[in-house]
Image (tube, rainbow, N blue to C red):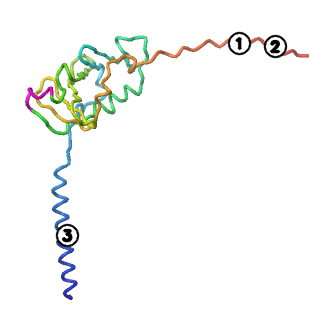
Amino acid sequence: MTRSTKIFTGIFTSLLILFYFNWKSQKGLTVDGSPIFSGDNESIHRFLIIDKKDSLELVKNDTIWTITEADTLVTKQNQIDNLYNRILVVKKEFIVSQNPNKWATYGVTDSLGKRFIYYDENDKEIGDFIFGNEGQDYQHNYIRQYNDENVFRSNDNVFFLLNTSPSYWGKKPVKTKPVQLQPDTTTSG
């Protein structure tokens, strides 16, 4: 081999080694979180959302979801889908605090956060979380399991989906007018 080929091979090998170590060190920086619910969606039969003094309860009867405070409204399927596809799959990425004195900083107190509880068909609590939205990070929320001191950062902002307004979750049923048959005005001759 010529001298220039040896130098090129040495530089190329050094770059490959550096690339490998860089890749290996960055691989350790990925955040794999755990979802707040990992069970069967069919096992959930009631949701309760509490925002300070306001609350909203959604109950599943058979396959139909109803809003207990507004039984004249028909639930919007896309909002129910958001419960399953966004809120229940939100992940706790990493711990940001283990100090209860810092809960207000992250908005995960009863007075600042939104509480999200879900139950099975026997009215047994499956999960109880408080979501906070304090700070400048609009792509993430903070999550605390209600009876736990640890505060986690979430992988998604779902705070706005935890709405306690019945009109957010339901709509008035569409009234259909009865069809009246018109008399035949054509004459046959």
Left or right of 78? Residue 146 is left
Q: Is residue 72 above or below residue 10?
A: above
- Location of residue 186 (image quadrant): top right
Whether label 3 touches label 2, CB < 8 Å = no
**128 or 141, which is in the foreground?**
141
The amino acid pointed to by label 3 is Leu
Question: Residue 117: x, y in percent?
Answer: 24, 21
Earlier sequence position, callout 3 versus callout 2: 3
Whether label 2 touches label 1, CB < 8 Å = no
Q: Which residue is mark 2?
A: 185
State how far apart marks 3 and 1 are (Cα): 83 Å
- Location of residue 130 (image quadrant): top left
Q: Which mark is residue 15?
A: 3
Closest to the camera, between mark 3 and mark 1, is 3
The amino acid pointed to by label 2 is Thr
Q: Main secondary structure of the magenta part?
A: helix
The C terminus sits in image quarter: top right
Residue placed at 28% from the left, 30% from the top? 88
Earlier sequence position, callout 3 versus callout 1: 3
Residue placed at 25% from the left, 22% from the top? 118
Q: Which mark is residue 97?
A: none
The N terminus sits in image quarter: bottom left
Magenta-highlighted residues:
98-104
The amino acid pointed to by label 1 is Leu
Q: Which residue is mark 1?
A: 181
Question: Residue 51: x, y in percent?
Answer: 26, 19
Q: Is residue 36 above or below residue 182?
A: below
